Image (cartoon, rainbow, N blue to C red):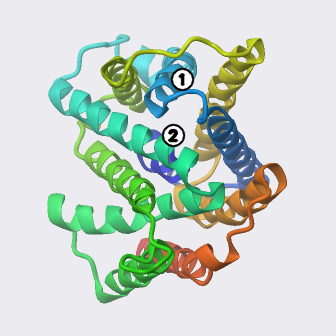
Amino acid sequence: MNRSFLVIILFPTHHGSMKTDRTLTAVILLLCALTLFDAMGLIIKHLSPRYGAAELAAWRNTFGLIPSLIVLFTSRDWHAKGRIWKIRQWRLALTRGVILTFAQFSFYLSLGLLTFATASTITYANSLFAVALAAVLLGEKVGWIRWSAVLIGFAGVVWIVRPGGDSFSPAALLPLGAAACYALVGVTARVMDSEVPTPLINLYSSVVALFGALILALFMGGFTPLEHSTDLLWIMAMGGLGGSAVLLLISAYRLAEQSNLAPFNYFGIPLAFVLGWLFFDEAPWSELFPGALLILASGLLIVIRERRLKQA
């Protein structure tokens, strides 16, 4: 599951000023979550030669239900509202799960075909898609600064993907498609009824994504028998790392406002590069730079603009 996507859909922000120590704790939790998500991605890439992307997504979502249920059952808001399960906009909630299915499948597939840092970096374009989709679907007014940021980020993505160039790989379109799907899931979360607890919305998406991954896996030939006994441990670690990362993200965004933490999300770009270099001996300098810097700059420009609007 993509990190920025989780930031968009899962966590309500708290109003009022936050103490410095709480914000610092939130930043530490966020950075730990990003590290765990990248560790999960490393395991997916490690297992990709032996197991399909749909299979891995199914295993990931199976274990991912555990943190979703933990968050829901520990949600004061959910208990206060009578522990509801059925929501009025259940069709929209299920649709978001279907979109999430394809987002996960595309991203997991790209991890097996591209360098780790390249696949991870391209998915950060989801913030750019989110701005455009919010303008189209939600009717948000997007000023020239944010549109400029979108264009800068898009130029960075094009620089990395290099369509029409000798080094172009169609696989590079997979994380780009995943980024668009993640952004669509995030934007549509904002039209859900405000009285519905966020963990319940996430649980709907997680359950549908699990069944969607199961269907994709069966359609593509079924599940591959475990080749090595250690693979089961890797699969359990994949789900455990992803689930733990979700819990850390939830904790982080309950301690501090999203606008204070958003710049630290881009810590994942250099982290993915370092991890890919350490574990897979990948150093895609020519693929990522300067495109990755343009994506980073565009994201930070959007963050700065949002904070100024909030202060105003």
Closest to the observer, 272 or 162: 162
Q: Is residue 85 left or right of residue 309?
A: left
Mark 1 residue type: Gly
Label 2 and label 1: CA atoms lie apart by: 10 Å
Count of residue discs: 2
Question: What is the quadrant of residue 196 in the picture?
Answer: top left
| SS at badge 1 | helix
Residue 168 lies, with reference to residue 195, above or below; the image says: below
The residue sitting at 44% across, 56% down in the picture is: 171
Query: To which residue does mark 2 refer?
Result: 1
The part of the image, by quadrant, that contains residue 151 is bottom left
Eyeballing the image, is 197 above or below 214? below
Mark 1 lies on residue: 64
Please give left or right for residue 120 compared with residue 42 in the image.
Answer: left
The picture places residue 13, in percent across and down from the top left corner, at 49, 49
Labels 2 and 1 touching (C-beta < 8 A): yes
**Residue at image point 71% right, 55% down:** 23
Residue drawn at (57%, 11%) of the image:
225
Q: From the viewer's side, name the closer residue of 53 and 304.
A: 53
Query: Residue pushed farthest front?
Result: 166
Q: Position of residue 37 (x, y in %)?
A: 65, 42
Q: Residue at x 51, y 46 (%)?
A: 2
Is residue 139 in sight in this rendering? no
Image x and y of residue 187, in percent: 30, 52
Mark positioned earlier in the residue sequence (2 or 1):
2
